[in-house]
Image (cartoon, rainbow, N blue to C red):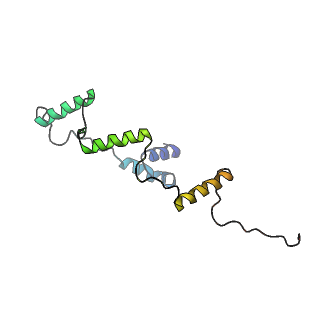
Amino acid sequence: MERKELVAVAVAAGITKAHSMKSVVLEEMLANMSKPETTGKRGRPVDMSSVRQIRLAEMEAKRANGELKRGRPVDESSERQARLKIQAANKALGIGQGRPVNPESARQKRLAEAAAKAEANGGVIKRGRPAKVEIDETAS
């Protein structure tokens, strides 16, 4: 086997830095790397007539048919479900949740002013300290 082929086989086998190793060392490493022996099925044998295996088979059949219900069922008469229905109805009507906005508050005025500035500048607000304006005294 030529050097290039040997390096390619070594890299495929998972040997890192195979290109910098001597060919003799690579051949020895590849010879020592043996495929793991496959053993038979391990562990305790499965009894297909057991109650658990029958239940698992039924669940798998339901899952294949799309009949398997997951999680706890919803109680439509609970307080939470009633509250969620009211919230959905309010959202459809455009009624928001929580405390209403006071347009006369200092924060809302500040936000409106910032939005007006952004609109005047084409949607861009310059942040930070303004640039220093140099005054040309020779012109006056």
Q: Nearer the viewer, residue 69 or 88?
A: 88
Q: How many marks overall?
A: 0
In the rendered image, residue 7, in percent from the top left (x then y), is placed at 49, 47
Name of the residue lying farthest toward the right:
139
In the rendered image, residue 111, in percent from the top left (x then y), is placed at 56, 57
Is residue 17 visible in the rendered image? The answer is: yes
Is residue 124 visible in the rendered image? The answer is: no
Say above or below: 28 vs 132.
Answer: above
Q: Quadrant of the C terminus?
A: bottom right
Name of the residue lying farthest toward the front:
104
Name of the residue lying farthest toward the left:
50
Say above or below: 39 vs 110.
Answer: above
In the image: residue 65, left or right of residue 116: left
Residue drawn where x is 11% and y is 32% of the image: 49
In the rendered image, residue 67, in percent from the top left (x then y), is placed at 25, 29
Say above or below: 53 vs 25.
Answer: above
Q: Nearer the viewer, residue 62 or 82?
A: 82
Q: Nearer the viewer, residue 85 or 49?
A: 85
In the rendered image, residue 98, in percent from the top left (x then y), is placed at 40, 52
Name of the residue lying farthest toward the bottom:
137
Residue drawn where x is 25% and y is 44% of the image: 79
Say above or below: 139 vs 3.
Answer: below
In the image: residue 56, left or right of residue 17: left
Q: Nearer the viewer, residue 23 or 100?
A: 100
In the image: residue 107, left or right of residue 118: left
